Amino acid sequence: MSMGATALAGLAFGILVFPTPRSAPVTTKYRIETKNETTVDLSSFNQPPQQVNIGLTSWVAVTMSDTTGGRILRLVVDSMKYDGTAPQISQLSADSAKGGVLHGLVDSKGRVTNLTQQPSTNIFLADIQGVIHSFFPKVKAGAKSGEGWTDTVEVTNTTNGSNVKSSFLINYTAGGQESVSGLTALKLSAASRASITGTIENPQAGTMEVAGTVTGTSTSLVGTDGRYLGGSSNSTSDQTLKSAMIPTAIPVKVLRSVSVTVLP
């Protein structure tokens, strides 16, 4: 199973915010830590389960700038640290993502669109793609502590030859205010559920059909100017994979945690 597939789990939490327009670009630095535990059930092939752990810590800079129809999002990777058991992946692979770029548009409705990455095949940048949506949770204007609201969204992942659509239902609850690096932030809690359908590319099995669900919870801190000031999430993804070469459905479970900290 490719790392791009495990990154799907992280899409369960990032949806909308209505950013405050700014006349000048604003850059914010973050530390992003993701952990994925993927278990592939091979019992139908009379084999033991295969488990892979992937841990990644990334230091990135995100710049938002005004444009027609919304705001341009540009993320640049400063450095990455890898810790995991995935075969053929090492710290050298993480180092290759240094200087990598994610580019997209946050439209007038607060949705991340046209998200691309360079280098286009870097698996570690694909993992960050699964996180960047969480930088834009939906905020209800004037919401009081304890007040809840819902949102729905569809996200399509085309990284590394994938073509996977994820449809989300998110239930938000407003919390109190907190201070983050001297900035006032609104705390949001969310519970979400997503359905996943599409195809991914596997070096051994070729094109594989993927279907499943993701459930999870998250917290987000949103500044008064609309900036994301950190948060965390935990999710469980239950998927099945099959292909022409492997017609028997293979169950895959992914446990994923994400922690984002804003840096001075």
Image (spheres, helix red, strand yellow):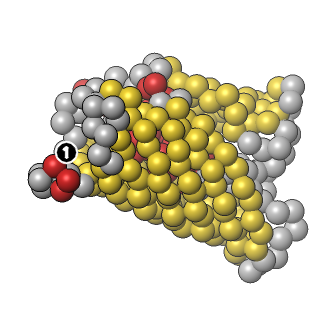
Label 1: which secondary element: loop
Q: Give me the residue at 54% from left, 67% from top.
A: 217
Relative to residue 260, is residue 132 depicted above or below? above
Question: Position of 155 compared to 203: left or right?
Answer: right
Q: Give me the residue at 78% from left, 77% from top.
A: 147
Q: Give me the residue at 64% from left, 55% from top.
A: 168
Relative to residue 234, is residue 245 depicted above or below? above
Camera-side residue of 89 and 195: 195
Amino acid type of disc 1?
A: Thr
Camera-side residue of 210 and 167: 210
Q: Give me the residue at 23% from left, 48% from top.
A: 52
Residue corresponding to mark 1: 85
Q: Position of residue 222 (x, y in %)?
A: 70, 57
Note whether residue 186 is visible.
Answer: yes
Q: Hey, which quadrant is residue 237 in on the image?
A: bottom left
Relative to residue 236, is residue 60 depicted above or below? above
Q: Position of residue 131 (x, y in %)?
A: 53, 46
Q: Hey, which quadrant is residue 221 in on the image?
A: bottom right
Note whether residue 98 is visible.
Answer: no
Q: Position of residue 244 (x, y in %)?
A: 33, 32
How crowded is the residue under tag 1: few (<14 C-alpha within 10 Å), some, or many (20+)?
Answer: some
